[in-house]
Image: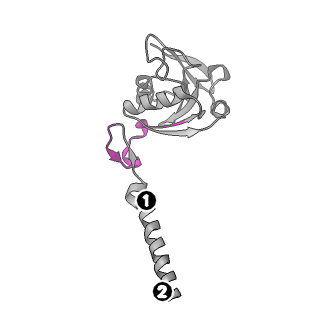
Amino acid sequence: MNRRYLLGSALSVAAVLAGLRPTASTAQQSPTANGITALPDAVPANRRMAIWRDPSCGCCDVYADYMEDNGFVVTRIDDRDFDKRSIAVGVPKEGLGCHLAEVDGYYVSGLVPFEIIDRLTAERPDVIGITLPGMPQNAPGMAGKIGALKIYAFNADGVSVYSNE
């Protein structure tokens, strides 16, 4: 009787655990901005964004929400050393933003508006990335985009103005 009881218990636990495991179809899905679930491969590279940010930075979460509202699928990565990661990928030290993102092979430092990122991935300039230094009060993630923001491009040759709008 103990064997049947143990076997029955083991099967019950296995059934419960099997019910808690994600299936192959749900494990590979991720939500999109419009609430429809899509496979990650079905999301174009220029709409996928990874953000390395300090977990205590509220503006980074607001910015990620802003990007999702504008059609990006965002992966948030807690990284208190995102500034070191930023410098390692080429962001100039004096040009650091409040987080580092990667989208379609480019690095984006700071609260860069989605329109500028769309332009970057469409034009595909020969740069490592772009940056909006600091945390300007009129940037997305802060008070919203109001007025001009000066965004810089950077590569191995140096820094140049990418956008001033």
Nearer the observer, disc 1 or disc 2? 2
Q: In the visual, does 134 lie left or right of 36?
A: right
Name the foreground residue: 120 vs 10.
Answer: 10
Q: Name the residue under label 2.
A: 4
Q: Where is residue 63 in the image (x, y as percent from the top left)?
A: 47, 27
Q: Residue at x 40, y 35 (%)?
A: 72
Element type at marker 2?
helix
Q: Which mark is residue 22?
A: 1
Name the foreground residue: 116 vs 19.
Answer: 19
| Residue 49 in the image: above or below residue 91 | below
* Residue 47 forms part of the magenta stretch: yes
Q: Where is residue 65 in the image (x, y as percent from the top left)?
A: 43, 31
Q: Residues within 10 Å of mark 2 (few under 14, many from 20)?
A: few
Q: Mark 1 is on which residue type?
A: Pro
Q: Position of residue 77 (x, y in %)?
A: 56, 40
Point out the stretch of residues depicted in magenta.
Answer: 34-51
Q: Which residue is drawn at 50% across and 31% down?
A: 61
Element type at marker 1?
loop
* Residue 101 forms part of the magenta stretch: no
Q: Where is residue 76 in the image (x, y as percent from the top left)?
A: 52, 38
